Image (cartoon, grey):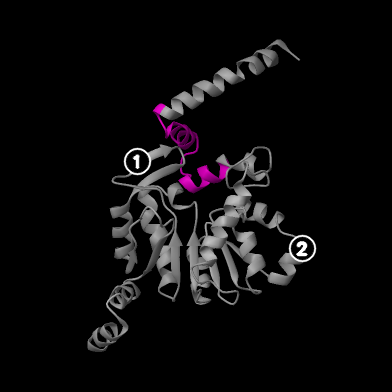
Amino acid sequence: MSFVARLSTRLLPLKQAVSRALSHVFPRLNYLIWAWRNPGKNFKTFYAESITAALEGRKKHASLGPKLKDDRNEVALRTFKQLIAQGISPNDTVVDYGCGTLRIGRPFIEFLEPDRYIGMDIDERILDAGRRSLTSELIVSKRPALEVISPDSVMRAAARRPRWIFSKGVLQHVPPAELDEYFCNLAHMVRAGAVAFLYARCGKESSVLSSKSWKHDIRQLQENAALHGMALDAPTRTRKFLRLQTLGAALLSMLQLFGADFADIVLLSV
């Protein structure tokens, strides 16, 4: 090994420590450097490129790739059971919006009837890693649809009239400037009859957590949802997922709290 190579190896821990310290002080520094080096490319491309090592199994990740951090499969299974408990049936069509490498998607594919699972994410490399996690028998028997998120793929998913959507581990990676696109895409499917369950890190105001993640202002999320004709629940200590549905469905749910007869009278008068 050359002197330069040995020196580089010895300095690697220091380089990593400096990088972590700078990221703590300037959480978007990595992205800003990348954006300067890659003019014209968007945040989605940065995100996909930043997880390449995880997708290829060269690095452990909390939610992506073949090498997950400890207990993450167990966490995924608990999340799957929590979602099933909301009333999802095997014959329902379900959209996994931000499906990643199918950590939660695989249990759904196994649970649902054929042609009932739709997985969507921002990059084909992510979907390819997800496909590699499935056996050929499961792919042939259940025929899951995996598509890159785009206006066309969103409309195709909406045309299949899904009953449910879930979006886990996604919103924290959506920049505040792209929230409108996120809710616009979901609105096409929600208006087609779906109910969505979202998981979000929420606070009293938006804040940057890292180069790839944010804590969102719940009021901003609700306002974005309302602009697209939807209502988003406020978080509670006990509810992990936030329910997203059309304003009409949300109103009906509220009215039913007063009793079915009252709800029927109000709906008939509208």
Q: Measured from the top left, where is residue 260 in percent x and y?
A: 32, 83
Q: Quadrant of the N terminus?
A: top right
Find the magenta span and give its range.
25-49
- Label 1 crowd bin: few (<14), some (14–19), many (20+), radius 10 Å: some
Tell me the kind of residue under disc 2. Ser
Q: Check disc 1 and report its element: helix, strand or loop.
A: strand
Residue 42 visible in image:
no
Location of residue 148 by image quarter: bottom right
Q: Quadrant of the C terminus?
A: bottom left
Pick out the residue farthest to the left.
269
Q: Is residue 116 above or below residue 183?
A: below
- In the rendered structure, does residue 29 fall within the stretch colored magenta? yes
Out of 39 and 31, give the one closest to the viewer: 31
Point out which mark residue 207 bears. 1
N-terminal of the two: label 1 or label 2?
2
Tell me the kind of residue under disc 1. Ser
Q: Check disc 2 and report its element: helix, strand or loop.
A: helix
Q: Measured from the top left, where is residue 261 in percent x and y?
A: 28, 86
The structure residue drawn at horizontal position 64% and vertical position 74%, both measured from the top left corner, is 113
Task: Judge from the rendering whether residue 198 lies leftward or rightward of residue 121; answer left or right.
Answer: left
- In the rendered structure, does residue 66 fall within the stretch colored magenta? no
Q: Measured from the top left, where is residue 59 in percent x and y?
A: 65, 37
Residue 91 visible in image:
yes
The structure residue drawn at horizontal position 60% and vertical position 68%, both measured from the top left corner, is 117
The residue that disc 2 covers is: 136
As measured in the structure, the alpha-carbon distance from the residue carrying label 1 to the one carrying label 2 is 42 Å
Location of residue 143 by image quarter: bottom right
- Label 2 crowd bin: few (<14), some (14–19), many (20+), radius 10 Å: few
- Magenta region, main secondary structure: helix
The structure residue drawn at horizontal position 49% and vertical position 35%, both measured from the top left corner, is 34
Location of residue 134 by image quarter: bottom right
Out of 128 and 13, give the one closest to the viewer: 13
